[in-house]
Image (spheres, rainbow, N blue to C red):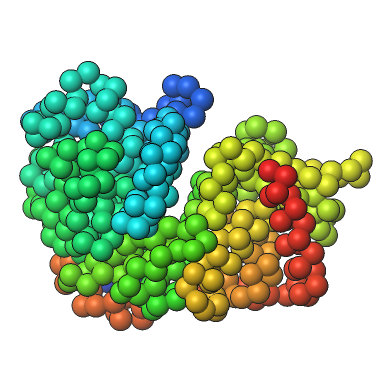
Amino acid sequence: MTDAILAIDQGTTGTTALLLDHSVRVIAHHNVEFPNHYPAPGLVEHDLDDIWQSVAEAVAGAVARAGDVNIRAIGITNQRETSLFWDRETGAPIHRALVWQDRRTADRCAALKAAGHEDRFREKTGLVLDPYFSGTKAAWLLDNVPGARARAEAGELLFGTIDCWLVWKLTGGAAHVTDPSNASRTLLFNLHTLDWDDELLEIIGVPRASLPQIIDNAHDAGATSGVGFLPDGIPVAGIAGDQQSALFGQACFARGAAKSTYGTGAFVLMNTGSTPVASRHRLLTTVGWRIGGEVTYALEGSAFIAGAAVQWLRDGLGIIKDAAEIEALASTVEDSGGVVFVPALAGLGAPHWRPDARGLFTGITGGTTAGHIARAVLEGIALQISDILSAMAADAGHPLTELKVDGGATRNNLLMQYQADILGVDCVRPTVLETTALGAAFLAGLGVGFWKNTDAISDAWAAQRRFSPQMPETQVEKHLAAWAAAVAKA
């Protein structure tokens, strides 16, 4: 029988379960997709029964593939800002979960800005007032579900992000907890006191009685009970929001280490050490993790659209039949032929923060082919990462030396080479691309002593390929200038 750690990676479109042994070998993994719901333009919701069913099927599938394993602990990583309330007694959600992409609270955020609150929120939370984050989602649920606010104030309803809800479900309702990485994405958490902030709770209108306890990322939160697809008594010992989990899974333990995850969107995080760095370039300051009471902070920049742009070429335009085809199509041309694509299909994230921006192609001529379009889409994904990392280096006060990359899109060698060219530093792809799940597994393993310390994790981390810059600097400057002009138009 093999001792293993189970990681549950609960994402926006599916759930992945991964079993990892002591030598950091992936024993088995299984992914199950579930639907998103779009009740109106700008609104995105998840049915919690769908999510729980996907967790059950993913875990059962991974365990079946693994064979004879002894699960020592469970780690959870999750889509961070997706928010819900549920009944403390019955566990029934009061409404579908509001997904991080949901924009229904844009007017509320604008009103908070108009009332002069933005600087206060930025100072305390490290975030900008944007519908992306959980706080205004929580307030919307309380104000729009009949009776919800009174019930929450009476302690009858529990609030949480998906990590919190999953721990509650796995422990049979025994634990209502979250971790600092997820808490720091709510607009309700003070980066300096590392607790919920009463002033911010009052401004947004969320009662403290409904909020979870905040525990360390590597910490025994409780044991499985009555789950059905897992035996009772397995400790849930690691929790982290997906991007912080990927930073941990990439072994970015040193100050200045950075990673970029290419999924539906793209998320860049840089370890800034034990002190929160206030961004001067509209990035986010966030908690990376807290282990043994010691906090590691990070700077973060988010691009809302990355892999989703490739899906749009497939589903919206029909230029490709499968996402994996884009590299071959883009390789039919030597360059984009002067075509630039700005992937603002859902507005622009950091460092621009322009929800009103819209995607565009510029530079199209009669000679433009599908290959040029495909190449421009890949380049647009990489160029927005360049914007984020330029801002990040300026905030951190030192240049980037290398970028660790992960996520499904990193299988695209053309994209990774272009990313290295534009950044002027090596991009390093690990042997295990599921670094989000890996981080959760590492945290859970630390939580139960499966791994002794982060040095053991660093020793086990391995690179699969290193992409070094090849493009002449004069060409890089032309690409960046064309990109800046296109962004200004968007």
Number of labels in the image equals 0
Could you tell me which quadrant the N terminus lies in? Answer: bottom left
Residue at the spot 89% in from the left edge and 43% down from the top edge: 365
The percent position of residue 323, horizontal first and vertical second, equals 62, 45
Viewer-proximal residue, 133 or 262? Answer: 133
> What residue lies at 38% left-to-right and 39% top-to-bottom?
115
Image quadrant where residue 242 sits: bottom left
Which residue is farthest right? 366
Question: At which x and y percent is residue 153?
Answer: 12, 32
Quarter of the image where the C terminus is located = top right
118 lies left or right of 384: left
| Residue 16 vs residue 195, the one in the foreground | 195
Query: Is residue 81 something that shows in the picture?
Result: no
Which residue of the protein is positioned furthest toward the top in this rendering?
146
Residue 32, horizontal then vertical, whole percent: 38, 40
The residue depicted at 35 percent of the width and 75 percent of the height is 273
Q: Looking at the image, which is closer to me, 4 or 214?
A: 214
Left or right of 134, for residue 214: left
Location of residue 224 with respect to 419 vertically, above or below: above
Q: Is residue 136 above or below residue 290?
A: above
Whether residue 345 is situated above or below residue 16 in the rendered picture: above
Q: Position of residue 56 (x, y in %)?
A: 26, 40
Whether residue 338 appears in this view of the structure is yes
In the figure, is residue 126 to the left or right of 342? left
- Which residue is at 92% across, 41% downward? 366
